[in-house]
């Protein structure tokens, strides 16, 4: 196994562990965050705030390099325009997240539970990605 693969595996494992420890693989946490008038749970905001507090300075620090450590170039999106595909994709993402309580990262992490709703969401995620690649 090469260094790039092992580094990616470690980063994914740490990310997944963080999602699991923070409870973000539990769709009720997300749905309760969105339920402002009911059983509101601010945990998601705290997790996102913590993620931003780490990511913003780390991203700035990493981009000071001319190239990444394990690749020849940075893979940063170059498009700046906001088009119908971006807006409709973001809307579908938000609707799906609000209805199911899952987004891709937590859903992939939650696959280890083997619960039917997670497997169903993941199947829909794969089908949606396949369909989007055809458009």
Image: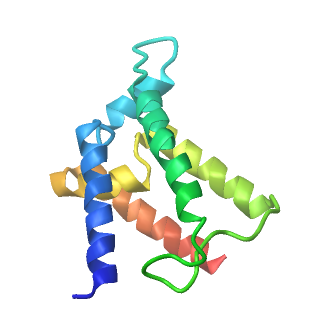
Which residue is depicted at the point 45% across and 25% down? 33
Q: Is residue 114 visible?
A: no
Residue 16's place in the image compared with 2, above or below, is above
List the single residue furthest toward the top: 37
* Residue 121 in view of the camera: yes
Q: Which color mode does the image show? A: rainbow
Where residue 48 appears, as percent x and y from the top left, is 47, 37
Q: Please tell me whether residue 99 is drawn above or below residue 133 in the rendered image.
A: above
Image point 73% across, 71% down: which residue? 78
98 is higher (above) or lower (below) than 74: above
Displayed quadrant of residue 114? bottom left
Q: Position of residue 43 (x, y in %)?
A: 38, 26
Please give the count of numbered marks on the rendered protein. Answer: 0
Q: Considering depth in this image, is 45 or 115 the residue closer to the camera?
A: 45
Quadrant of the rendering where the C terminus is positioned: bottom right
Residue nearest the observer in this picture, 77 or 131: 77
Residue under the point 45% across and 77% down: 69
Q: Quadrant of the N terminus?
A: bottom left
Q: Residue at x 51, y 16 (%)?
A: 36
Q: Quadrant of residue 75?
A: bottom right
Query: In the image, is residue 122 above or below residue 31?
Result: below
Furthest residue to the left?
A: 113
Q: Nearer the viewer, residue 45 or 120?
A: 45
């Amino acid at each position: 196994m090469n260094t790039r693969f092992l580094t990616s595996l470690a980063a994914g494992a740490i990310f997944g562990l963080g999602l699991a420890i923070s409870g973000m693989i539990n769709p009720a946490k997300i749905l309760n965050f969105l339920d402002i008038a009911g059983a509101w749970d601010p945990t998601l905001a705290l997790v996102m705030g913590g993620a931003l507090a780490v990511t913003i300075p780390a991203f700035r620090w990493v981009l000071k390099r001319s190239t990444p450590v394990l690749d020849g170039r940075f893979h940063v999106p170059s498009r700046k325009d906001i088009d119908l595909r971006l807006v409709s994709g973001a809307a579908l993402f938000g609707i799906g997240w609000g209805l199911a309580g899952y987004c891709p990262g937590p859903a992939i992490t939650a696959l280890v539970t083997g619960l039917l709703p997670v497997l169903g969401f993941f199947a829909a995620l794969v089908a949606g990605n396949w369909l989007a690649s055809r458009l």
